[in-house]
C-alpha cells in the first residue's frame, strides 16, 4: 500500500543521528533540519517497521506488526551523515495478514536467504531502551569523543580499575609509521596495576565475593561445578603460591596445555597474579606444535592434565605433553616441572604415565598452599601473555599482549558489545586456547564481575541440543559462538533447538569468520526467537579485543555485516597502493592509530611485526583482511587476503600445512589453498607432488593427512589431497595460487590468464586428476 499522506498526519522515524524525516503531503520523505531520535508522534496506526528495500528507486518500508493504535513507528537508520542527500518517494507495505503474535522478523527474514545490503534488522524498542548504548546518536557522540580525545576517553575508563600507581603524564604514545622509525605503542605506561587483582580482588572487595564467577559444565551432562568470586580468588592464590615456590618469577613464562576445565582460567589468572607470562597452547595442538611454543618461550613450568573427554572420545593430553617435553629436552630446553591436573572423569591416576621427579599432581600440592597471595604489581606495559597465531610463513607468530591497555580494552569491549548487565550469565563456546577465550572467557568478563559458563565438552554430545540444554540449565543470557558451530547445528534441524526454552537469551554473538547471512538468519530467528540482537564481532588475536562490532540496541543490523567500529577504533579501507578510500568502497582493512588492546610485538621478532603489519601500508596497521563499506557506512568483512585460511574460525597458514606435507618422505612439493566449505567456512585443499616413482595410493593419502595432524593438530588436516604431477609455476618459479584456487573450487572456466606459466600443460594434467 502506498502511504497516502492524508492518512498519516505525521510519523516518527526510528532514525539515528542528526536527521529527521517526515512524510510530506505528496508522500515524500523530507529531510528536516532538526535533530530527532525516536520522536513519537501520532498517526493512523502504530506499527513496528523493521526493514526496507530499494524498490525501483523507492524506499519500501516493511511494516510488520501492529503494536498499538494510533502511532506509526517507522524503522530506518542512516548511519552515515550525508546519506540522505535527497528526498525519496516511499511506499509503505503493510503486512496486514500477519497476526500480532507472529515472530515477524522470522517471516521476513526467511523469505530471502541472501542478504541484501538494505536488509535491516532492528532492535526492539524494549531492548534499545535499556541498552548501554541505546541509539546511534549516543554511539556517534561517544565515538566522536573517543577519536578526538583518545587520551581523555581511555583514561577516564581506565580510572574505573585499580591502579597502585597512576600512569605518567602521557596516557599513550605511539609510532605506527615505519617511515618515522621503529613501531612502538604504549598505553598507560608508568601505571602500576595487576589484571588478576582487577578481575578478582576488586570484585570481592566490592562485595561480590559470593557471586558465581564460573559455572563449569563437564563433558557429561551430569558433571558440573561452580566457583564464586571469593572461591576463585582462593584457588588462584593457591596456585600462584605454588608457582612461586616452584621458582616462577615475574617475567618468567609458563606454558599451559589444558582443556576447558576451571583450572585453565585459574592457571591464567595465577600467572597474571605473580607477573608471569602465560602461553596457553590450545589442547588440540600436536606435540610438535607444543615443542615449537615451548622452545620459543622456555617456560619454567608446564601445566597440563592427564586426559580429557570430548564427546565420547578420551584424549590423552599428558602423552602429548610428555612427547613434547622430551623433544624439547633433545633441543636443549628442559622442563623441570610438569604440573598435572588429574581429570578424574576422563582418566584416573593409576592409568597415567608418570615421570617421577618432574611430574606433580596438581591436587597433591596446590590445595596445601595458602589461600591468599600477595599481588605482584606490574607496569601497564609489562607482558601479560603470548599467544601464537598463524601467518603466511611456516613459523607461527608469538603475539605479545601487555597488561594495562589490554585490561581496559577487553573489559570495555565486552561490556558494550554484549550490553552487559550484572544479572547476565555469559557463555562463550570458544576455548581459552584461542584469543577469544583469553579476552572473552577469562579477562573481559571477569573484569566486569560477570558469571561465566565454562564448558568442557562438545556441542553435539550427547546430541545436537547440548548448547540449548546448557543455555536453559544456567539461564544463559549472552551466548557467544562461531559461525561454523551455527552452520553445523543448522544442518541437523530446528527441533534440537526448539525443544528447549532459550527464554533467558538476550544477546547472541558471533566471531571467527564472516557469518553468512543464512546462518545469521537461522541464529537470529531460530536460536534467538527473532528477539536477540547478534553481535557479529570482527577482531583478531593481534587486536586483543573487538574492533568492528554491533553495539546491540544501538542501531539496526544487516545480516553478515559487523557494522561499525568500536570506540577509539579508526578503520581505513585502502587500495593496493595504500591510498585511503572514502565512502562506499572495497579494499584492504587497515587501522589508523593504536588502541589500548593492540599487541605490542611478535615475541622475539619485532622485525616480523613491522614487516607483516605495518610495512604493507605505511602509516597504518594492516589487518590482512579484505573489507567493503556500503553506502550506509556498514563494514562487511570479506576474508583474508593473505595466505592464511580460516578453518572453523581457526587461522591456519597455508605455508604451515605445506611444510608439514613436505616433511613426509614421499612428498616432494605441496601447495595448499582454501576452498569454500559448507560447515567449516573454508576447507584445506592440498595439491601434492610426490617424489619420483612414488605411485598415488589411498594409503599414502591417509599417511599425508596423518603427518599434518601430527605436526600441527587434527584441526589442520587437509580435507582433500589432489595429486599433482606438477604445480603451475611462473617462469620465476612462483606457484600461481590463483589458478590452484580456481581448480580446487572447480571454477575451470575462470582460470584467467595462464600465459606466464613456465609449463601451461600442467593445468590440463591437474584438471584431469581433479576427481581422482
Ligand atoms: C576472521 C579471532 C569476519 C578475520 C577473534 C580475522 C572475522 C581473523 C570475524 C582473526 C568476523 C574474525 N567477521 N571475519 N566477525 N572475526 N574474523 O586471530 O579474517 O583467530 O583476520 O581471532 O578471523 O582470527 P583470530
Image (spheres, rainbow, N blue to C red):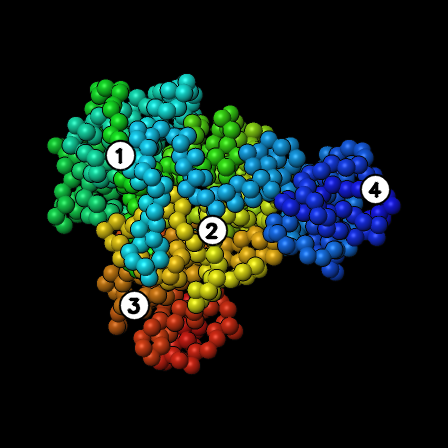
Q: How far apart are marks 4 and 2 (CA)?
A: 41 Å
| Residue 313 or residue 738, whichever sits in front | 738
Q: Report the residue marked by disc 4.
A: 9
Indicate which disc, 2 or 1, sits on the residue closer to the N terminus.
1
Q: Distance between the residues labelled 3 and 2?
A: 42 Å
Residue in view at x 38 percent, y 43 percent = 596
In the rendered view of the protein, which quadrant contains the C terminus? bottom left
Q: Report the residue marked by disc 2.
A: 570
Q: Is residue 600 visible?
A: yes
Indicate which disc, 1 or 4, sits on the residue closer to the N terminus.
4
> Residue 745's x, y, as percent?
48, 65
Using the image, determine if residue 77 lies above or below residue 264: below
Indicate which disc, 3 or 4, sits on the residue closer to the N terminus.
4
Decide if ligand 1 comes within 8 Å of the CB at mark 2: no
Q: Report the residue marked by disc 1.
A: 378
- Any mark on residue 669, and which? 3
| Residue 276 or residue 134, whichever sits in front | 134
Indicate which disc, 3 or 1, sits on the residue closer to the N terminus.
1
Q: How far apart are marks 2 and 1 (CA)?
A: 29 Å
Please tell me whether mark 3 sits on a helix, a strand or a loop. strand
Q: In this image, 642 relative to 519: left or right?
A: left
Q: Say which of marks 3 and 4 sits in front.
A: 4
Farthest residue, direction right: 6
Amino acid at each position: 500500500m502506498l502511504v497516502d499522506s492524508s492518512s498519516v498526519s505525521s510519523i516518527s522515524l526510528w532514525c539515528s543521528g542528526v536527521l529527521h524525516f517526515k512524510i510530506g503531503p505528496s508522500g515524500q520523505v523530507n529531510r528536516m533540519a532538526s535533530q530527532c531520535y525516536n520522536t513519537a508522534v501520532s498517526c493512523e496506526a502504530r506499527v513496528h517497521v523493521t526493514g526496507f528495500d530499494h524498490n525501483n528507486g523507492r524506499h519500501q518500508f516493511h511494516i510488520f506488526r501492529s503494536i498499538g493504535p494510533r502511532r506509526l513507528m517507522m524503522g530506518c537508520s542512516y548511519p552515515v551523515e550525508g546519506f540522505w542527500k535527497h528526498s525519496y518517494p516511499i511506499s509503505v507495505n503493510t503486512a496486514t495478514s500477519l497476526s500480532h503474535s507472529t515472530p515477524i522478523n522470522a517471516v521476513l527474514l526467511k523469505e530471502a536467504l541472501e542478504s541484501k545490503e538494505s536488509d535491516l534488522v532492528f532492535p526492539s524498542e524494549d531492548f534499545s531502551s535499556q541498552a548501554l548504548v541505546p541509539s546511534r546518536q549516543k554511539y556517534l557522540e561517544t565515538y566522536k569523543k573517543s577519536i578526538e580525545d583518545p587520551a581523555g576517553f581511555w583514561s577516564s575508563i581506565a580510572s574505573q580499575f585499580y591502579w597502585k600507581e597512576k600512569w605518567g603524564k602521557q596516557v599513550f604514545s605511539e609510532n605506527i609509521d615505519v617511515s618515522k622509525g621503529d613501531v612502538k605503542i604504549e598505553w598507560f605506561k608508568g601505571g602500576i596495576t595487576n589484571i588478576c587483582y582487577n578481575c578478582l580482588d576488586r570484585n570481592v572487595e566490592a562485595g561480590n565475593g559470593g557471586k558465581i564467577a564460573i559455572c563449569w559444565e563437564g563433558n557429561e551432562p551430569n558433571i558440573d561445578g561452580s566457583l564464586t568470586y571469593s572461591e576463585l580468588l582462593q584457588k588462584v592464590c593457591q596456585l600462584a603460591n605454588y608457582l612461586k615456590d616452584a621458582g616462577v618469577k615475574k617475567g618468567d613464562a609458563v606454558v599451559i596445555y589444558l582443556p576447558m576445565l576451571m583450572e585453565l582460567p585459574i592457571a591464567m589468572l595465577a600467572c597474571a597474579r605473580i607477573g608471569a607470562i602465560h602461553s596457553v597452547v590450545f589442547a588440540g595442538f600436536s606435540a610438535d606444535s607444543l615443542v615449537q611454543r615451548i622452545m620459543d618461550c622456555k617456560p619454567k613450568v608446564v601445566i597440563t592434565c592427564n586426559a580429557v573427554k570430548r564427546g565420547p572420545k578420551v584424549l590423552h593430553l599428558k602423552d602429548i605433553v610428555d612427547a613434547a617435553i622430551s623433544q624439547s629436552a633433545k633441543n636443549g630446553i628442559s622442563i623441570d616441572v610438569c604440573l598435572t591436573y588429574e581429570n578424574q572423569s576422563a582418566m584416573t591416576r593409576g592409568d597415567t604415565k608418570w615421570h617421577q621427579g618432574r611430574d606433580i599432581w596438581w591436587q597433591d600440592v596446590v590445595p596445601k598452599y595458602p589461600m591468599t597471595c600477595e599481588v605482584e604489581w606490574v607496569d601497564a606495559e609489562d607482558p601479560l601473555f603470548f599467544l601464537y597465531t598463524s601467518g603466511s610463513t611456516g613459523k607461527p607468530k608469538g603475539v605479545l599482549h601487555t597488561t594495562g591497555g589490554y585490561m581496559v580494552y577487553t573489559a570495555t569491549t565486552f561490556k558494550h558489545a554484549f550490553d552487559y548487565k550484572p544479572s547476565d550469565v555469559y557463555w562463550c563456546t570458544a576455548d581459552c586456547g584461542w584469543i577469544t577465550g583469553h579476552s572473552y572467557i577469562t579477562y573481559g568478563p571477569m573484569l566486569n564481575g560477570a558469571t561465566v559458563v565454562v564448558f568442557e565438552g562438545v556441542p553435539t554430545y550427547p546430541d545436537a541440543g547440548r548448547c540449548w540444554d546448557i543455555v536453559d540449565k544456567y539461564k544463559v543470557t549472552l551466548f557467544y559462538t562461531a559461525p561454523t558451530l551455527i552452520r553445523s547445528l543448522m544442518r541437523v534441524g530446528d527441533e534440537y533447538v526448539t525443544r528447549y526454552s532459550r527464554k533467558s537469551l538476550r544477546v547472541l554473538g558471533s566471531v571467527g569468520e564472516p557469518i553468512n547471512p543464512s546462518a545469521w538468519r537461522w541464529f537470529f530467528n531460530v536460536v534467538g526467537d527473532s528477539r536477540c540482537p547478534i553481535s557479529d564481532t570482527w577482531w583478531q588475536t593481534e587486536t586483543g579485543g573487538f574492533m568492528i562490532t554491533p553495539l546491540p540496541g544501538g542501531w539496526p543490523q544487516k545480516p553478515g555485516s559487523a557494522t561499525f567500529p568500536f570506540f577509539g577504533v579508526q578503520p581505513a579501507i585502502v587500495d593496493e597502493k595504500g591510498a585511503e578510500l572514502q565512502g562506499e568502497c572495497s579494499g584492504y582493512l587497515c587501522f589508523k592509530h593504536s588502541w589500548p588492546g593492540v599487541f605490542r610485538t611478535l615475541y622475539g621478532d619485532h622485525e616480523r611485526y613491522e614487516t607483516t603489519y605495518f610495512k604493507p601500508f605505511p602509516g597504518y596497521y594492516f589487518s590482512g583482511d579484505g573489507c567493503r563499506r556500503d553506502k550506509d557506512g556498514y563494514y562487511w568483512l570479506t576474508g583474508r587476503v593473505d595466505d592464511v585460511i580460516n578453518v572453523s574460525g581457526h587461522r591456519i597458514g597455508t605455508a604451515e600445512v605445506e611444510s608439514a606435507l613436505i616433511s613426509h618422505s614421499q612428498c616432494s612439493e605441496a601447495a595448499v589453498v582454501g576452498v569454500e566449505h559448507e560447515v567449516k567456512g573454508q576447507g584445506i585443499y592440498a595439491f601434492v607432488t610426490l617424489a619420483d616413482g612414488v605411485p598415488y595410493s589411498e594409503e599414502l593419502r591417509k599417511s599425508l593427512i596423518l603427518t599434518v595432524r601430527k605436526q600441527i593438530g587434527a584441526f589442520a588436516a587437509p580435507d582433500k589431497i589432489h595429486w599433482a604431477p606438477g604445480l603451475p609455476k611462473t617462469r620465476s618459479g612462483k606457484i600461481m595460487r590463483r589458478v590452484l584456487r580456481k581448480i580446487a573450487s572447480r571454477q575451470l572456466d575462470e582460470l584467467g590468464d595462464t600465459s606466464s606459466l613456465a609449463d601451461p600443460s600442467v593445468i590440463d594434467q591437474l584438471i584431469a586428476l581433479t576427481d581422482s
